[in-house]
Image (spheres, rainbow, N blue to C red):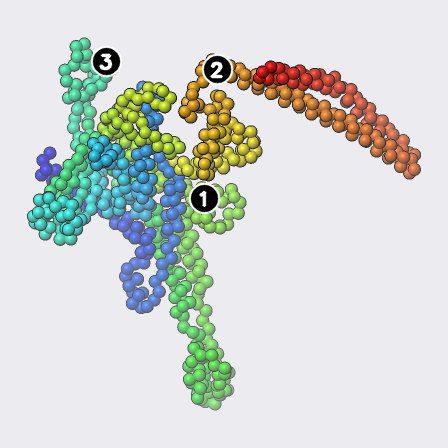
Amino acid sequence: MTHEELLKQAREHWRECSEDPAEQENRARGREDARFAAGEQWDPATRRERELDKRPCLTFNRMPGFLHQVENEVRQNRIGITINPADNGIDKDTAKVDQGLIRHIQYDSKADTATHSAFVEACRSGLGAFKLVAQYVEDESFDQELKIEQIPDAIHRFHFDPFAKQPDRSDAAYAFEAEVLSHDEFKRQFGESATAKSNAFDGAYGNFDDDWLTAEGVRVANYWYVEVRRRKLLLLNSGQTVFADEAGVLPEGVTVEKEREVLARNVKCAKLNGVEVLGEYEWPGSTLPLFPVVGEELWVDGRRQRFSLTHFAQDPQRLYNYYRTSEAEVVGLAPKAPYVAAEGQLEGHEHQWATANTKNWSTLPYKTKSLDGNLVPAPRRDVAEPPIQALSLGAGQAADDMKATTGIYDASLGARSNETSGIAILRRQTEGDLSNLHFIDNLARAICACGRSIVEVKPRYYDTARQIRILGEDEKVRVVKVNQECVDEDGRTHNYSMSANKYDVRVSAGPSYTTQRQEAFTTLTEFVRAYPDLLKIGGDIVFRNSDVSGAEELADRFKRGLPPGLADDAKDGLPQIPPELQAQIQTLVQQNQQLTAALNQASEQARTKQLELASRENVVTLQEETKRAIALAQIDSREGLELLRQEIAQLTARVSTAAQSRQPEADGQDAAGRAAQESAAAAEPGE
C-alpha cells in the first residue's frame, strides 16, 4: 500500500469512528460525566443567573465516595495474568519461566498503575484504555522487551472501530491514538517532516473534510490497522501443518493430505498527521495491542450505549445540591422578623424602632393609642419560620436516591446504617460489591486480552539466546538464560525455549503478595500460639512471611535446623547427603519416633497410676471425714447414724472393687514402661 493509499484509508477510518452517531453520543456523555464527577454539577446558565443575583450556588459532591469504593476495590485486589499449558509437550519448568516472564512484564512496566488508571477513567467517563508496547532493553542493546502502558485521557485520545462486536474489541479492524500538538511542539518533534518545513498549518493541505491541520494545532495519530490476506494451510502426511507460501519444495515421501484457506491478520501501525506519513511499524500479533476498558455497555436499538458508574446518580446529586443550597439561602439570607405596629404608635421613637433589629436597645418606648385615639396593644414581631425541615427531608431523599442508583449503601461506604449485626453489614457490603461487579469484570476482560497478546508476540521479541528476568509468586526477581542450554542451581540442564508455546490465558484477582504474606503471618502466629511445636517444623515459613528486620536470616537458620526430609538442602547451598546415609538416618529417625511413642505411652500410664493412688488417698480422707460425721450424727440422731453407716459401707465397697479391677492393668503398664525405658537406654549413642 502506498502512502497516498494509506493516508486516504486513515482519513476515511477517522471520519467513520469520529462521526459515528452512537459513538459521538457516548463520548459527549462520557465527557459530561467526567466533568460532573470533578464537581461541575450546576447548569452553566443557572450558575450564571444565580451569581448575577448574588445567590448561593453550592456543590456538595458525593460522587467521589461512590467512585472510590469501586476503584479502590481493584487497587486492593490486583488482577494478574495466569497461563496454563494448552499442549502436553510443554516442559513444566519452561511453563514456569513463561509465567514468571509475564509476571515480570506486569511488575516492571507498573501495569497495575496503567490498568488501574484506565479503570478509573472507565468508572468516571465510561472509557479507559491501555496498550502493549515493545521497547529496547537499553540504548546500547538490540534486545527488546514488552511493556504495558496507559493511554491517558482515552475519552479524547482513543478511537476504535465502531463496528467491532466483541466485548474486548479483539475483532477491531483499526484504532487511533490521537493527540493535538501545538505548532511549536509539532516542529520540535517532527521538524524534518515536509509539513513542518512548509509551514502548512493554515490548512493548505486540508482540501478534505478532516480536522488534522488547523490554525490551533496539528493532530498526530498512531493509526493501527489490520491487513487481511488469504493463505492456504496444508496438512502433511507427517501430521505437520504448514502454509503453502512457506512450505517450499516438499521432501521426498511427504505429501499433502488436506488443505484449506485461512484469513491471516497482519497488524501494522503508521504515525501520521492526515497529510503525511511520519513513520511506520509492524506488530507481530494478529490483534491490535490496544485494550479498551469500558464502563457499563448496553445495546439499544442496534446502537452500543456506554455509561459511567455515576451517570444515573447525577439527577439525585443535582437535586441534593439544590436542596442544600436552598437551606443555606433560607437560613443565611432570610430577613429579620419585622415588627407590626399601629399607625402613629411609634411616633417620636422612629429611630429606635428602625434599628431594633441591629442594635440592642434597653427600652423601646411606644404610644398606647393610634392616630384615631384608639387603644392598641404593644408592637409585636411577625415571625415566619423558614421550611428548613422540609428541605432537609428532601435532601435526605435525594441522598438515598444516589445510593439506590449506584447500588452502594452506607454499609459499603463505611458509615453507620440501620444494620446492627456483623452478618447483616457484611451482606450489605457484598450487595454493594455485586451491584458494580460488571465494571471490574470489564477490566479483567481487557487484561485477559492483553495476556493473550503477550503469549502470541512473546516468541518474536524473546527469540535470541539471552538472559531475562522473571518474577516468582513471592515477588522475588530471578535471572534465567533462555533459548540456550543452561545449568540451574540444582545441577540440572535446561533449555527454556521461548518458542510459540500454546497457553490458555485467564486472569486471577486477589490481594497483593505483601497483603497475602501479612495475612499468612497473622494466621501462622495464631497457630503457633495454640500449638507451639509447629514452630519447630515450620519456623522458616513463619519468619519468611514476617516483615520484621532479620526475618530472612532467622528463616534460613530455622531451615538448616530442620530434620532431613523437611529441609531442601540443595536450595540452601548445603552439600547433598549420600543416599546410603539418608537411608540410615531415616531408619534411626523411625526408631527414635517409635521409642518416643513408647515412652510417651509409659508416661501416660504412670500418670494414670498416680491418679489412681491419689484417688485411694482421697478415699482414706473421705473415710476419716465420715468417722467424724458419724460421731456428730450420734449426738444428733441415731436414725441418721444408721443411714449414714449404710451409705459409707456402699461407697467403701465400690472403691475397693474398682481398685482391685485396675490393679493387674496398672502392674502390666508399669512393666511396659520399664521395658520401653530399657530399650531407649540401649539405643543411646555409644552404647
Distance from disc 1 to disc 3, alpha carbons, whole Å, reads 59 Å
Q: Residue at x 18, y 12 (%)?
A: 255
Quarter of the image containing the N terminus? top left
Q: Is residue 301 left or right of residue 618?
A: left
Q: Residue at x 82, y 24 (%)?
A: 653
Tell how many labels: 3
Q: Residue at x 23, y 28 (%)?
A: 460
Q: Are marks 1 and 2 in contact (CB under 8 Å)?
A: no
The residue that mark 2 highlights is 581
Residue 632 in the image: above or below residue 483: below
Circle on res. 478? none
The residue that mark 1 highlights is 429
Quarter-of-image position of residue 242: top left
The residue that mark 3 highlights is 238
Looking at the image, tell me whether mark 1 or mark 2 is earlier in sequence order: 1
Residue at disc 1, secondary structure: helix
Q: Amino acid at mark 3?
A: Ser
Quarter of the image containing the C terminus? top right
Q: Are marks 1 and 3 in contact (CB under 8 Å)?
A: no
